[in-house]
Structure formats: C-alpha cells, structure tokens
Amino acid sequence: MEFFDIMNKACTNEGLFFDEEKYNKFIKYKDMIKEWNEKINLTAITEDEGIVKKHFIDSIKVFRFSPLKTAKRIIDVGTGAGFPGIPIKIMIPNVEVVLLDSLNKRVNFLNEVIRELELKGITAVHGRAEDYARESRFREKFDIVVSRAVANMAVLSELCIPFVEVNGQFIALKGPAVEEEIKEGSKAITTLGGKLQQIINVEVEGTDLKHNLVVVNKIKETPKIYPRKAGTASKKPIK
Ligand code: SAM
C-alpha cells in the first residue's frame, strides 16, 4: 500500500480527515527528518516505512482520546523531532501548539520544519520542562499536555502535569508494560493534582507495536513547590 493509503486509513480509523495537502506536509517532514538525521541525532528510525508507521501513525493514535480533536492549546513535552506534536498540528491546524525540548539542535530542526511546512500557530521552545512550568505564561495554561518516550510516569507527571489547566488532561504515550509504571507513578499523579482517568490500548496498523495512552485528568491545582528544580524529578521521583 502506498503511504497515502496507509495514512488515510489510519486517519479514517481515528475519525480524522486526511487529504493531499496534509499528505504533502507529512512527506516533506519525512524527507527533512532523513536529511537532518545525517547531521544531528533525531531518530534511530531512518527508513521511510518506519518513519511513516512508527512515528507518524503512532503519533496520530493519540486521537483515540477523542477530546483531543477539539483541543485549544497543546504542549508536547520532550518533543524531540516533533512527536507527537507536529502530526497533531498537521491533523488539526486550528489548535495552538507549543513544542518543548531541552536539546537546542532539535529545536532548530523543528523551527525549520515549521517554516518549510508553513505551519501557523505553533512554536518550538528550547529548555527544560521544570523551568518552563514555573513561568506564568505556561503554568496551567494548556487544556491538553502530551508526551511520548521521555520518562517513566512518576518523573513524567512532575514534568507535565504542572502545564495542564484544571479540568484539562495529560496524555502520556506509553509502551506495553504500563500497569507497573502507573502503580509506581500513582503517588506523583495525585500529588501534582491529577487523577488517572483511563488507559487506552492502541495497535499501530502494519507494525507489532502495542501502545497505551495514559489519560490523566487535572482535578486540582499543582502545589507551588512543583516541579522541583531541573533534574530533581528524575533523581528523587515522588513515590
Ligand atoms: N517525544 C519524541 C519521540 O517520541 O520521538 C522524543 C523522545 S526522546 C527519547 C526524549 C526527548 O525528551 C529528548 O529530545 C530530550 O531532549 C527531551 N527531554 C528530556 N528531558 C527533558 C526535560 N526535562 N525538559 C524538556 N525536554 C526533555
């Protein structure tokens, strides 16, 4: 199957509209990943098919949590080469997106992608989540926070939940062994003002990937002492 058909099918499965314009943006993005990956480390997946399925379609699976389709302002914490933030933006162009990463080279790449794909209402920022979450323009200012492959739930909750506004959601894209992680992270989730809402199992068509979306509701404000200073969450996770 051609990439257009593969992506079209994946989008249809999530109730999303796909067309030539979106397809062209994804193809340009894929080519930029391959080109830049020769100069800076963006991803270990370098084949077209892997990029399409394991990055693009895996990112699109986040829409299985359907309220995402009407999100207003999203931050992607530890976005790396833009996953899942860029695919989300391509799929729902009206949403405002912030891509955050602590590696400047990756942020430079993202700025180039934003320019080349002519994406509007999206910014890439360089820094640590722990520092940005203390700034008033970011703290509790997002209705949805997403993150894939950044840290375990105990640590990730401290990096992400402070950005979520009360009644908003934090969605962590996780691998298959999620139960144990959630058990380990449950104290952190509640301490930061969250409540586990649901775990959504997803399979990525045409791969053996079995992933989970962990959805956390923000039910009260995050105490002012969180996040602690950069690095503390991973050294001394809330447990
Ligand atoms: N989310 C992308 C994906 O799924 O392909 C990238 C995953 S990569 C394994 C983890 C990324 O998180 C890296 O690009 C790293 O620089 C970033 N990161 C790790 N800790 C961070 C922090 N405290 N604040 C911001 N970014 C962070």
Image: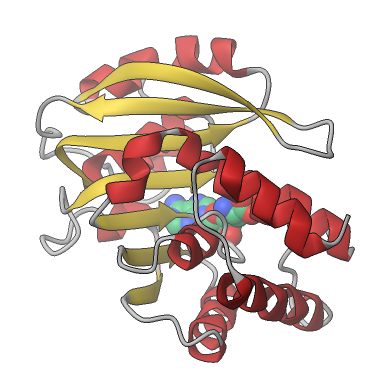
Left or right: where 108 falls relative to 186: right
- Percent position of residue 191, x then y: 23, 21
* On-image quarter of the N terminus: bottom right
Residue 203's quadrant in the figure?
top right
Residue 44: tell me if it is visible: no
Q: Is residue 129 above or below residue 204?
A: below
- Percent position of residue 27, x then y: 72, 75
* Residue at x 59%, y 81% (from the top left corner): 109
For the image, the number of numbered tags is 0
- Percent position of residue 21, x then y: 57, 77
Residue 49's quadrant in the figure?
bottom right
* Residue at x 77%, y 32% (from the top left corner): 209
Residue 93 vs residue 236, the one in the foreground: 93
Residue 42's quadrant in the figure?
bottom right
Q: Is residue 173 above or below residue 5?
A: above
- Percent position of residue 146, x then y: 42, 46
* Residue at x 31%, y 63% (from the top left corner): 95
